[in-house]
Amino acid sequence: MTYNLETAEHPEKLRRVAIDPVSRVEGHGKVTILLDDQNKVHQVRLHIVEFRGFEKFIQGRPYWEVPVMVQRLCGICPVSHHLAASKALDVIVGAKRLTPAAEKLRRLMHYGQMLQSHALHFFHLCSPDLLFGFDSDITKRNIVGVAAAHPEIAKRGVLLRKFGQEVIRVTAGKRVHGTGAVPGGMNKSLTIAERDELLKDIYHIVSWSRDAVHLIQKVHIQDPGLYNSFGIFRSNFMSIVGHNGDLDFYHGTLRARDDNGKLIFDDVDYQQYDKYIEEEVRPWSYMKFPFFKSLGREHGWYKVGPLARVQNCDQISTPFAEHERKEFVDYAGGSPMHAPLAYHWTRMIEMLHAAEVIKDLLHDDDLLSDDLMVEGERKMEGVGVIEAPRGTLFHHYRVDENDLITMANLIVSTTNNNQAMNEAVRHVARRYLHGREVTEGLLNHIEVAIRAFDPCLSCATHALGKMPLAVELVDPEGNVVHSLSRS
Amino acid sequence: MTAPVVVFAVGNPSRGDDAIGPVICGRLEKWLENEGLADQFELIEDFQLQIEHAMDLQDRQLALFIDAGANTPAPYSFQRIAPAEGIAHTTHELPPEAVLQVYLQTEGVEPPPAFVLCVRGEKFELGEPLTAAAVSYVEAAFGLLTRLSGQPTLLEWERAVL
C-alpha cells in the first residue's frame, strides 16, 4: 500500500497520455499517464473531471424532498441514493425500526436494483472484454458485438435487467424518479397482481443468475495467470454486514479487514462512521480519498463493493449463493483474493443472492400489508448507509428546526474505491505500458482495470454527442503529437 | 393494449439543458391528453437509454427518441435512424441506434421505424434551469412534435425529416 507512481519527480519533462473520458464507465473520467522519451511510466492518475456539487445543491431544501432529489445524482443507481437518503432521514424522524412491511418492501426495491445493475455491468459492460479479449476489435467489443456472437447471453442480460427494473417500478411507483421510500417507511405496498406478475419470472431469473456465476467462474479458472494477477494490489476492505455476519446489502454494521483478512473494526454503528473514516482532499483530484483513521492516510485506504462484501461476510443466507461463495473462498485458498478481475465473479454471486432474496420476499405476504409508517422522537442529524451495487454508500444530513437541510455529506461507493482504482491503474500501466508504444488495445487494459470496480464517476448527464473518448499524446515540451477519439 | 407509438424522452431534470427531454415529455403528455390521443402513445422518460429499452419497442408501429444534444444543429434535428453496430464506445448509455440493434439481435426481427428528435442544449450544469436558448429550441421542437403526433404515420414522419 504505497503511493508509488502517484507523483512524478519531474513531470515537466514527461509525455502525457490521456484517456478522456474512460469509455463504458458511468459519467466522465480521465486517466493521465506521464511517460518519458523511452515510454517509461513516471506518473499515473485517475482523475475525476467534474465536480459533483450535489451536497451544496441539497442544502436549504426541506428534508422530505431529499429521497427524491438525490436520485438525480446517478442515472445508473438512483435507487441506492433514494434508500440511503431515506435511511438517514428515518433517524431524523425518529423511526428507529421500520414496520416489517416497509423494511421488506425497501429490501425488495434494493435487491431489484442490485440485480439489474449487476446484470447490466456484467452482461453489457464487461462481457465484451471477457468474451472477446482486451485486445479484440474495438468495433465488436461492445454489447452489440456480444449480441451478434452470443445472442442467448445478450438476451438474458436484457431480461435480467428488465426484471430488476420491474421490481423497482412496482416498489418505487415509477421506473425513474420513484417515491416509494419516505422518511419513516414506505408510501405504497405491492398489489397481489404486481406480486404475481413478478413471481411468473423469478425462477428463470434465479436460474440465469446461477448460469452467470458459472460462466464467470469458468472464464476466471481457465486463465488464472491473467485473472489472478491483472491489476492486482493488496488493500484493506470494508462493507456493512448483517445479522450474524450475513451478507446484507440493505442494513447492518460496519466491518473492516486488513489485506490478510484480519479484523480492523467490527460491529460499528454507522451513525459513528466519522469516528472511523476520514476523507482526504488531494490537489490533483476533485474526488476525496477516504481512509481508516486508525491506520492513517498511507495505510488506511480500502476497497469496497462485491469483492469486499463477499469476503467480508461470514456467510450468505441463501443456499445457491452460499454454495458459490464457498467455491470462491476455496479457490482463493483461504486468504483474501485481491485481484480486481475477481470483482466480476463476486458480482455474479451477489446477483444470484439478490435473485434468491427477491424470490423469498415475493412469497412473503408482508409485502401486501398497508402497515407502512412509523415515527418517533425528532432528531437533528442522521446517517444512512447502504451497500450500493458499487459498494458502501454513506448519506449524512443535519436539519434545522424548520426542517431544512443545513449539512449534507455523501461518500459514494466510487469515492470509497478511489485510491484502490488508482492503484489498479498504476499496476496495469506499469506492467502493460512500460516501454511500449501506446495502442488502443493497451489503453483498453487500463480501462478494463477501472471497469472491474464499476465506477460511477459523475452525475447522469449524457446528452447526445456529450461523451467523446479522446486520447492525446503530448511530448516532453507539451506538444500534442498524436490524438485519437471515439464518438 | 400496446400503444402503437412509443416515445423515449431522455435526460436528467437537474442538469441544465439535459432536462430538454423530460420537459418536452411533460408537455407532450398534457397535449396528448387534451387532444384525446393519449392511448395512441406510450411515453417513457428515463435518465439514459439502456438495453432494456429495446423491449419497449415490441409491437410498435413507430418509435421516437427525444434527447438533448451537445454541439448539434439548432434548434433541433429530426432524422430517421436504423440499427447500427459499433457506433457506441459506451454501453452505460446507448445511442438510439444501438437500442434498435439490441432489439434486432435479441428479437431476430427488424425494429419498428424509428426517429430521433435531437434538440440542441447549451449548458449541462447541476442545478441550473434550461438556458434561454434551450427554451426557444424546445418551443420550436414542440411545434414539430405536435404535428408529428397528430399524424403518426411513417409517411408523414418521413416527410418531416429535415
Image (cartoon, coloured by chain):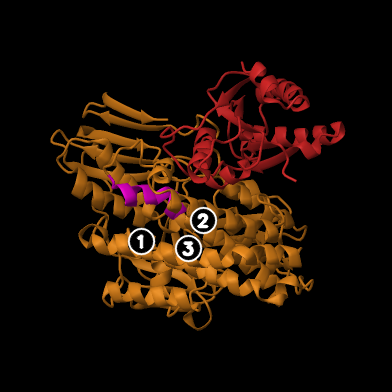
Is residue A250 visible in this depiction of the protein? yes
How busy is the neighbourhood of tag 1: few (under 14 within 10 Å), some, or many (20 plus)?
Answer: many
Asked whether the residues under the numbered discs 1 and 3 touch, taking CB atoms below 8 Å apart as contact, a structural biologist would say no
The residue segment tinted magenta is A121-134
Query: Which mark is nearer the camera, 2 or 3?
Result: 3
Q: Earlier in the sequence, mark 2 or mark 1?
A: 2
Pick whichever of labels 1 and 3 is earlier in the sequence: 3
Report which quarter residue B132 is drawn in: top right
Q: Which residue is mark 3?
A: A208
Tell me the mark number nearer the camera, choosing from 1 and 3.
3
Q: Is residue A26 left or right of residue A439?
A: right
Give the amino acid type for the residue marked by disc 3 in the picture.
Answer: Trp
Pick whichever of labels 2 and 3 is earlier in the sequence: 2
Task: Write down the colour of chain A.
Answer: orange
Residue A313 located left or right of residue A66: left
> Disc 3: which chain?
A
Asked if marks 2 and 1 fall on the same chain, the answer is yes
- Residue highlighted by disc 2: A117
- Mark sitting on residue A216: 1
| Element under disc 3 | helix
Residue A380 visible in image:
no
| Image-based side of A46 in relation to A441, left or right | right
| Hue used for the chain lettered B | red
Q: Give the amino acid at mark 2.
A: Ser
In reply to whether residue A129 is colored magenta, the answer given is yes
